[in-house]
Amino acid sequence: MLKGGICLQHVNLHNHTVYSDGVNTMVENIGSAIANNMVALGFSDHSYTPCDESYCMKLKDYDPYLQEISQLKEKYTGRISIYAGLELDHDSDPDTNAFDYCIASVHYIIRDGKTYAIDHSLAQQQLCCQEVFGGDKLAMAKCYYDQLTEHVTRCKPTFVGHFDVITKFSYIPEEDPRYQEIAANALEEVVKVCPYIEVNTGAIARKCRTTPYPARFLLERMRALGAKPVLGSDSHQKENLIFGFDEAVQLLKEIGFKEIWQFNGKDFDPIEI
Ligand SMILES: [Zn+2]
Ligand SMILES: [Zn+2]
């Protein structure tokens, strides 16, 4: 991002490594972050979810995960800031005190003992919608946003991850004003608890979307509510650490945002865009 001839240096707190479902090690990711002139990198592997152990961290991995990050923080002091984060699912209840930050995300709808991974595939969303909501897509969307609102209210995260990930497979009718009202009402509730909302470019890298989460109408609502955008790439491989960030900044500027918010280890600093 060029502004007055100066390159905007990026921070990304939403990264997955081999501790959960990422491809690369922490060290490999840090090498790529330094090559990309980033000022900070946070690791946010998936918290342990009893409903689905296939892609999350195992309980026994929390300690080694934190220990490795602690060692890397020291090793790379003066070159890049490293933070210990967690992408905290709502079906998860770890002690988060040892982490520098938490991202609140919802990946599942769980009903009658059955788990539907709503960000995993179109087939999972279709099955969930048929089996749980009798084919009512708006009811499924409402359930997702209710869970997200409850999750954010309960865990009080550092920021909120991929707010409208329920739209990932274009199954939910995003143009339907009734859907937009459900999502916008949820956003209003969420922002009251946590004003920091991720602008997530992950689905662009995975070719599910051409624009970041949240959708433009929600970004516009964020602007009106005074919510604070935090860039996140939801990277699962080292090549994608800042994927789509420059385009996301451009979009935010178009909508009227004057700044993005970058984590400093304790809080967020506004960065002019
Ligand atoms: Zn996620
Ligand atoms: Zn993620």
Image: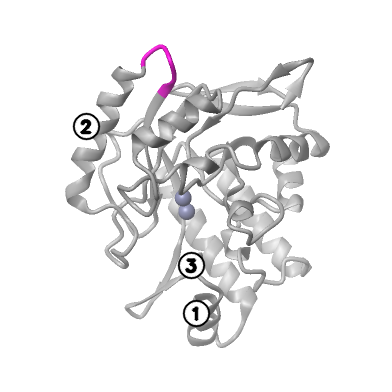
What type is the residue that disc 1 sits on? Cys
Q: Which residues are magenta?
A: 77-81
Disc 2, SS: helix
Residue at the (32%, 66%) spot, across then down: 52
Q: How is the image coloured?
A: one colour
* Residue 145 visible in the displayed image: yes
What type is the residue that disc 2 sits on? Gln
Say which residue label 2 marks: 67
Image position of 260 with respect to 19: above or below: above
- Report the quarter where the N terminus lies: top right
Say which residue label 1 marks: 128
Disc 3, SS: loop
Image position of 49 with respect to 100: above or below: below
Image position of 206 with respect to 247: above or below: below
Q: Nearest to the eye among marks 1 and 3: give it.
A: 3
- As drawn, the residue found furthest toward the left would be 60
Q: Please report whichever mark, 2 or 3, sits nearer to the chain's N-terminal start.
A: 2
Image position of 172 with respect to 194: above or below: below
